Each structure stands twice: as C-alpha cells, then as structure tokens.
Image: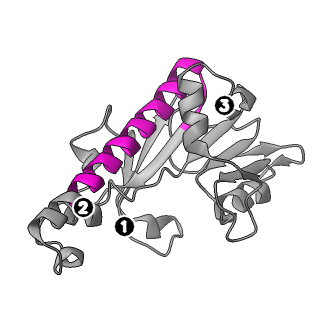
Amino acid sequence: MEIKGKVHCFFEQSGTFKNEFIKLGIPAEDYDIQNNFGETDNVVDLFTAIEDAYDGKPSLFDQVGGEDLIVAFFPCIYFSCLSQMGISWGYTNYRKLSYKEKTDEILKRVANRERFFGLAAKMLTIAKERGIRLIMENPWSQQTYLKANFILPPTMVDNNRRLRGDYFTKPTAYWFINSEPTHGFTEQQDKKGIR
C-alpha cells in the first residue's frame, strides 16, 4: 500500500509506530486520551470522536484526507482471552466476593464489552462509508471475543510477529478497510526517493 498522506495512529501514545513511519519519511501523529510517554500529538477522546462521526456531527474524522491512513490500535481490554475469564464466577479476582457481587461485576464487564464492541464497529463503519483507509489491530489468541462475534472477519492474522522484528509471538489480527495488505518487500516513495 502506498501512503502519500499522513498516518493517524489512533489509541497510541507511545510514539512507537508514529516514529517508525516518520523514519520512512511518512508524516504521522499519535492520538490518545492519555500522554503518559510524552509522545501523544493529539490528546483527544477518540470514543467521543467515533460517536460524533457516526452520528454525522463534526469530528476529527473530518480531518483525515483521502491519501491518509488511520492505524487504530483499538483497546482490547474487553475482547482479549484474559477478559473472557472475567465472565465467570471462578475468576480469581472475584474469590472474596459474594455470588451477587460476582454477578454484578460480570454484568458490568459484559456491558463494557458491548460498548467497546459498538465503538469498534462504528469506527469501521465510518471508515467504510467515508472511503477512509483504516487498519484496525487487535489480539487474536485462543478465546478472543472478536473471533466469533465481530461484524467481519480480519483481513489477515499474523501468527508470529517475531518474524517481522517484534518482541512478541502473540497472534494479531488486522482489519483493512478501503485498503489491502501488501506482502513481501514494499517500496515506500518519499520526497527523497525510494526507501
């Protein structure tokens, strides 16, 4: 995929990916509600931005150009296999709670998961309908909630990220909206030529 515009790294505050794009000569910015690493270029509530864009209100999605790309590291806290364990009376963190208290905690977790599911689905819908190029990343391990319960299957699953220089093997899924993955060597053109 050729990137002629800017990369908008949603839900990313570490600068890790932004800085790699910048090394390739591609302008990039981080967007997150926190700035714990001092790298967040745009401190913004992305959930509100998603809701606003979905409801047709002005939002930061209006600033994403046709040549731009959004890379969204959508929070997986309620989709991961660890979260699945929190929907059981036997969950270790609930061991000192009464059954009613356990059930109340489980129902809160399920409500939060439903909210996050809706936000992820809305974000992909916004991109699809507006023609915005977007890649959403999320874990893809044994009992990940999105495996059997999402609006579309991932475009690709990377089963071993270490092969591409990451420290972790953990499987990761990617949903490509209005774009396709490239495989093998990809040349990136910038103002200085091919990199």
Residue 27, position as x, y percentages in the image: 80, 47
* Residue type at numbered disc 2: Glu
Which residue is disc 3 drawn over? 61
Q: Position of residue 145 (x, y in %)?
A: 26, 50
Mark toward the viewer: 1 or 2: 2
Residue 102 appears in the rendering:
yes
**Position above or below: 64 against 147:** above
From this view, report whether residue 40 is shown above or below residue 10: below
User: Between tags 2 and 3, which lies in front?
Assistant: 2
The reply to whether the magenta stretch includes residue 10 is no
- Residue 103 appears at what percent x and percent y? 15, 59
Check disc 2 and report its element: helix, strand or loop: helix
- Would you say 159 lies left or right of 166 here? left
Q: Which residue is mark 2?
A: 105
The numbered mark, 1 or 2, whose residue comes first in the sequence reads 2
Position of residue 113 relative to residue 149, above or below, is: below
Residue labelled with disc 1: 170
Drawn side of residue 178 relative to residue 92, left or right? right
Q: Position of residue 97 (x, y in %)?
A: 17, 75
Which comes before the other along the chain, label 1 or label 3? 3
Relative height, residue 116 to residue 43 (above, below): above
Mark 2 touches mark 3? (CB < 8 Å): no
The segment highlighted magenta reads 106-134
Q: Residues within 10 Å of mark 3 (few under 14, many from 20)?
A: many
Q: Residue at 53% across / 50% down in the picture?
A: 184
Q: Is residue 122 magenta?
A: yes
Q: Residues within 10 Å of mark 2 (few under 14, many from 20)?
A: some
